[in-house]
Image (cartoon, rainbow, N blue to C red):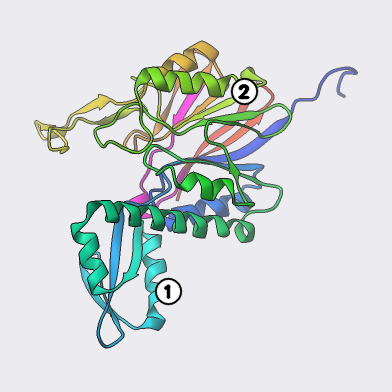
């Protein structure tokens, strides 16, 4: 029997995942997990969008030429929707166009980038439109973009009624547990849309943490993992951005953020939720804080996440899920 006057602990069950990079297959598996595990929330830490456009070029006879994974296709207008869905399922961005426009995008980098942005916004909208049919109404869908996601997609997420936009914000899971989110990273070799100096990142994280009401029971959902934490080991690259191999082994270096590590050491939340470095799944304890990175195999259509159950100021369940 519960003692009189004692406050009952509150539990929260959610799925955390990250780094889908345009794979609609993985996104659908993520959404489906809400019913499978009877979740209170789905938490996504960014890098939603893909990086490769598949041109689908109209022919004089009204059909379309396209190439996917080394195979050439001649498509009728009726076959386009299924082909475009197939592209999205494996992380590619389909675009139906004509020969003149296709040549412009091949030669004009500025227009090509504008097209990328437009298509990424459209695909994010398609993804979010799937939520009402796949996720129970009592399950929150908490989304923050990552460093690879263009800033333009934020408006799509903010304006969609089926999800909660969480970038640089704190979202309550219940009256006791919160998720503090930030998708920015320290500098990378790839000049991604959301990266900044460690000093600037530290200030961003401080501003997010300032919104937290209950630090002891909070989860910090910071896309980049803490520096030198095992879950941030990435291939060491040469000047052409190719991995350096020595003795038949790819050399690795810590690529996480020193600012993230400082913030975790300073505030000691219950849990750290990270991604960014696909090759370093795992977990590590920093002080009282358990930090996790599910890793990513989006190219193979494999979903990777952590099933989390928080019970008051304890982690009751932290289970890696793959499939």
Where 98 falls versus 172 (above or below)?
A: below
In depth, the one of 21 and 106 nearer the eye is: 106
**Which residue is label 1 attached to?**
81
Image coordinates for residue 70, horizontal then vertical, percent: 20, 66
User: Mark 2 against mark 1, which lies toward the viewer?
Assistant: 2
**The stretch drawn in magenta includes residue 295:** yes
Image coordinates for residue 153, horizontal then vertical, percent: 46, 47
- Residue drawn 61% across and 49% down? 34
In depth, the one of 301 and 108 nearer the eye is: 108
Where 318 falls versus 229 (above or below)?
A: below
Q: Secondary structure at mark 2?
A: loop
Taking the image as drawn, is residue 67 in sight?
A: no
In depth, the one of 54 and 265 nearer the eye is: 54
Image coordinates for residue 273, horizontal then vertical, percent: 49, 31
Point out the tag, 2 or 1, that comes first from the N-terminus. 1
Where 213 falls versus 126 (above or below)?
A: above
Q: Are marks 2 and 1 in contact (CB under 8 Å)?
A: no
Q: Secondary structure at mark 1?
A: helix
Image coordinates for residue 27, horizontal then vertical, percent: 48, 53
In the image: residue 194, left or right of residue 240 = right
Kindly indicate the quadrant of the structure image that contains residue 256. top left
Q: Residue furthest right?
A: 4
Q: Residue furthest bottom?
A: 61
Boundaries of the magenta span: 290-304
- Residue drawn 40% across and 43% down? 149
**The stretch drawn in magenta includes residue 90:** no
- Residue drawn 28% across and 55% down? 112
In depth, the one of 30 and 157 nearer the eye is: 157
Which mark identifies residue 211? 2
In the image: residue 56, left or right of residue 220 = left
The Cα–Cα distance between marks 2 and 1, rounded to whole angstroms, is 44 Å
In the image: residue 29, left or right of residue 55 = right
């Amino acid at each position: 029997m519960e003692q009189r006057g004692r406050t009952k602990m509150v539990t929260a069950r959610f799925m955390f995942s990250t780094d889908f990079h345009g794979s609609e297959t993985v996104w659908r598996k993520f959404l489906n997990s809400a019913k499978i595990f009877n979740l209170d929330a789905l938490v996504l830490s960014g890098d939603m969008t893909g990086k490769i456009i598949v041109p689908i070029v109209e022919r004089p006879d009204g059909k379309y030429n396209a190439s996917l994974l080394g195979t050439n296709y001649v498509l009728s207008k009726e076959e386009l929707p299924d082909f475009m869905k197939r592209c999205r399922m494996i992380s590619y961005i389909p675009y139906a166009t004509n020969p003149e426009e296709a040549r412009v995008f091949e030669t004009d980098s500025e227009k090509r980038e504008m097209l990328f942005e437009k298509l990424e916004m459209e695909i994010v909208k398609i993804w979010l439109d799937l939520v009402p049919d796949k996720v129970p109404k009592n399950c929150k869908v908490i989304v923050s973009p990552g460093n690879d996601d263009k800033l333009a997609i934020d408006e799509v997420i903010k304006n969609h009624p089926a999800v909660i936009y969480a970038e640089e914000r704190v979202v309550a899971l219940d009256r006791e547990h919160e998720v503090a989110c930030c998708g920015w990273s320290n500098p990378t070799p790839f000049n991604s849309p959301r990266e900044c100096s460690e000093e600037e990142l530290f200030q961003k994280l401080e501003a997010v943490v300032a919104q937290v009401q209950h630090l002891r029971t909070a989860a910090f959902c910071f896309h980049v993992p803490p520096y030198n934490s095992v879950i941030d080991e990435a291939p060491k690259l040469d000047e052409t951005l190719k991995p350096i191999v020595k003795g038949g082994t790819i050399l690795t270096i810590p690529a996480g953020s020193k600012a993230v590590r400082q913030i975790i050491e300073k505030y000691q939340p219950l849990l750290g939720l990270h991604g960014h470095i696909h090759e370093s799944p795992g977990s590590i304890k920093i002080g009282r804080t358990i930090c996790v990175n599910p890793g990513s195999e989006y190219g193979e259509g494999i979903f990777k996440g952590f099933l989390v159950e928080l019970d008051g100021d304890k982690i009751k369940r932290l289970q890696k899920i793959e499939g």
